[in-house]
Image (spheres, grey):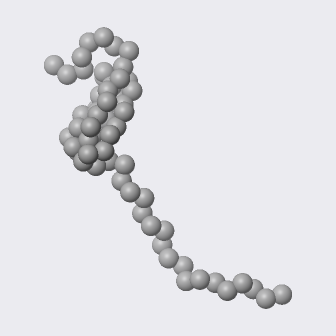
Amino acid sequence: MATPPTSPSRPPEPAPSPIGPGRVAVVTGAASGIGLGLSQRFAAEGMHVVMADAEQSPPFP
């Protein structure tokens, strides 16, 4: 039985970064902790950030 021809192997293409200017992030639990930290980081990267949390007070002073 003949073996199928092989193609030269190439490294896989890198996935596009999910973080970048103009992209949109929806962050839940954004009033404190990790959610707040992610929201701040995404905003610093130039992303549009939608922040959601069950807390009534705003997360930023």
User: Viewer-proximal residue, 45 or 50?
Assistant: 50
The image position of residue 59, as x and y in percent, is 24, 20
Instruction: Please name the residue shown 31% across and 22% down the image.
Output: 32
Outermost top residue: 56
Specify the quadrant of the image occupied by residue 43: top left
> 4 above or below 47?
below
Specify whether 49 is left or right of 9: left
User: Viewer-proximal residue, 2 or 32?
Assistant: 2
Specify the quadrant of the image occupied by residue 48: top left
Specify the quadrant of the image occupied by residue 58: top left
Specify whether 30 is left or right of 45: right
Outermost right residue: 1
Q: Is residue 33 visible?
A: no
Question: Which quadrant, please, contains the C terminus?
Answer: top left
Question: Which quadrant, please, contains the N terminus?
Answer: bottom right
The image position of residue 30, as x and y in percent, is 33, 25
> 38 above or below 52?
below
Instruction: Please name the residue shown 30% across and 44% down the image.
Output: 23
